[in-house]
Every structure is written in structure tokens, then in C-alpha cells.
Amino acid sequence: MSSTESPGLYIHVPFCRTKCPYCDFYSVPSLSAVHVWAEALCKEIVAYKDRSGVFGSLYLGGGTPSVLEERELALIFERLFSHFSFSPDAEVTFEANPDDVTEKKLALLKSCGITRISLGVQSLDEGELRALGRRHTAEQARRAVEKIRAGGFSNVSVDLMYGLPGQTASQWMNTLKSALEYRPEHLSCYQLTFHEGTPFGRMLQEGRIGRLNEEEQRLFFLMTAETLESSGYRHYEISNFARGEGFVSRHNRKYWRRVPYIGLGPGAHSFWGGIRWWNESSVTSYCEALKGGRLPIQESEALTDEQQRIESLCLGLRTSEGVDLPLLRTYPGFEKVLSRLEDDNLVQVCGDRIIPTREGFAVADSLPMLFL
């Protein structure tokens, strides 16, 4: 982690019009408490105004930030820019669903200082979109990208998902190649995860849907990486691809580099000075705490030196930056493990850094355990 890299600021918008069956992020499928939440968020902003320096990135995620109306958006951004300092070239990302994208909302986002739109497309197949519980159609997603371009945004990220129940490799490639026609500056391609407690998680347990086996997961992953790299994208993190260094998600990269960040909103996490804390995952509890003059922190933990080393190892092996060789030397027997990984073409040594190969990315979650 660079000691000179500026921290990041994250705002969690915990509202959706509907809840997708695969999602395990904290959100509520109702907009009834939006105004109360916005007022509470403004109180939390004020509470943190003296706790940080200059932020290099601002990220509004969710939930679905694009469900917010002009009143809430204007209020939130006014408070943010009044109480926090941001670098002149700060990356300001706003997550949006395609069916919320209008010319009027885009103009408002532009006036608020948004520099980057992250569009939750997931699929460009109508049947898959219905199975995922998405509200938009493939045509709405395509039109949304066109509107964003027309609105003057030159940094667009598109979220896509593969490994869906019943999805074929051909269907996935059709979605991927259709997305490439719009030349987004950034693509996030996630394999569907079946989280416990979600509708999809329960359906998997009950045998009503299936998941990819390990070899199928590997093939989908490699096919995705090969297609995007051959189209000029840099594969800089397991699920993330950028059309050049300038379009790497600067905010998310702070997480992988363990740069300090503040998270505001219900369920948001923060990391500062070796301490991690997270807010109540309840709109009601969050708002009540701030109304009573208290920070809505649910719990915190001070990371030991060993925990921080393990985090650096696990996160670094998810990225094309890899990890420092001196870090690996702190683990007994690292030479033997490293030699084996090189022989298996899972990592390569570049100077004093260990970098995962494409095959290494495919099994990145297991690599740190070999050293530990």
C-alpha cells in the first residue's frame, strides 16, 4: 500500500425498487424511508468532516443510487462537497440501473460532479434478465449506454454476470460481444455467486437450480479474460477489466491496496489506521442512532500485524500488481511453494513482485492458502 495515496469515500444507498434473488448486499425494496435516510446521512457526513484529509475518490453504491430523486441527490452532494475535501482530479462514481437512466437525471449527475457511471446491466439476454429478476430489458440497457454517452460521460463501466443457471458459453459470449460494441471504458464480469439466505441460495440448496462445476467455472473465466484482453482491455483484477490504466477503478483499487477509506450509510464498512468498523445494517437503526447524536457503528476490530499481512497477501494475489516478494519471505517454506506455482504457470516473478498469471487468476482464492 502506498502511504501517500489519498483515501476513498464510499456512500451506501440502501434502496432498490425490487430485490434481485442473487443479491446479498444490504438493501430494502422500498423507497418510503429515502428522505429520512438522506437526512441521517447528512448528519453522519458532518460527524466525519474532521476525521480525514483529501479524498481521491467518491463512490455511491448500493442498493441502487439511481433511484434517488433530485431533492435527495442535491442535498447529499451539497453536504459532501461542503464538509469534505476532494482532489481536483477525484474519481466520482455513481452506480445506476438502466431503467433509471434519463437525460434529466444524467444532467443532474453531471452538475453534481459525477465523472464515472457504473451501469448494472448483468446480461443482454432477455430470458436471463427475467431469471435474474432484473427490471430492465436488454434494449433499455443498450439505450442507457447511448444516453450516458450523449450526456457527456466518457468513463463508463458495465457490470455483467456469467455462470447463470442454464447459461451456455454461447449465450455468455453473445452478451459479452454485444457489450463490447459500445466500447465501455471498464467492464466488471462477475461469476454468479449463490449466497446463503438469498432466494437463489435457497433454490440451490433445494436442488431447483444448479451451479457451474469447477472446470466449467475455469473455462468461463478463461474465455472471458481471453476475449476482453484480445479486445484491448487490461485484466487488472480477477473480475475487472479496463481499457487502459486511466480507466482502472481508482476507488476499488484502494480496497485491494488497503488504502484507508471511509464508508457512510447503513451497512457501510470503513478502514483507517489499521482499524476496521462497520455500520448497522438497518435503515431504522442507522437513522435512530444519528437522530440521537450517535454514530451508527455496529462493531469494530483492530487488525494485528499478522492479519494485515494476510490481507495484503490475499488481496494482492487478486490483482495484476501482485504482492511484494519480501512479504512472502515472512512465511516459512515460501521458496518451495513459489517454485511449484511457477512450474504450474500460476504465478510469475517480475523483479521483486509475484504476479498471478491468467491461470493463476482462475484459482486466486486458493493461492494465499498455500503460503499460509
Image (spheres, rainbow, N blue to C red):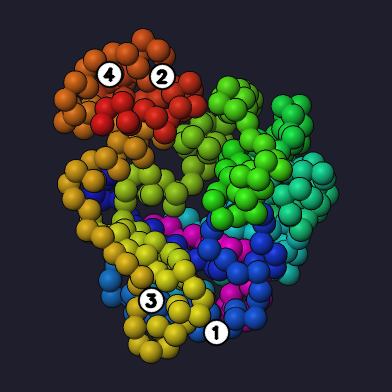
Query: 10 Å neighbourhood of mark 2: few (<14), some, or many (≥20)?
Result: many
Residue ID at (23%, 41%) = 309
Query: What amino acid is found at the position of numbered circle 4 in the picture?
Result: Val
Q: Residue 57 lies in magenta, yes or no?
A: yes
**Residue on which disc 3 sits:** 296
Query: 10 Å neighbourhood of mark 1: few (<14), some, or many (≥20)?
Result: some
Please name which of the two marks, 3 or 1, marks the residue nearer to the observer. 3
Name the quadrant of the N terminus. top left
The spot of residue 301 in percent (x, y) is 26, 60
Residue ID at (61%, 44%) = 205
Q: CA distance from mark 4 to mark 2?
A: 11 Å
Disc on the earlier residue, 4 or 2: 4
Q: CA distance from mark 3 to mark 2?
A: 43 Å
The spot of residue 265 in percent (x, y) is 46, 71
Q: CA distance from mark 1 to mark 2?
A: 50 Å
Q: CA distance from mark 4 to mark 1?
A: 53 Å
Q: Horizontally, is 339 left or right of 207 in the view?
A: left
Secondary structure found at label 1: helix
Closer to us: 363 or 66: 363
Name the quadrant of the C terminus. top left
Q: Horizontally, is 254 left or right of 222 in the view?
A: left
**Residue on which disc 1 sits:** 36
Q: Which residues are magenta?
A: 53-76
Closer to us: 306 or 312: 306
Secondary structure found at label 2: loop
Disc on the earlier residue, 3 or 4: 3
Disc on the earlier residue, 1 or 2: 1
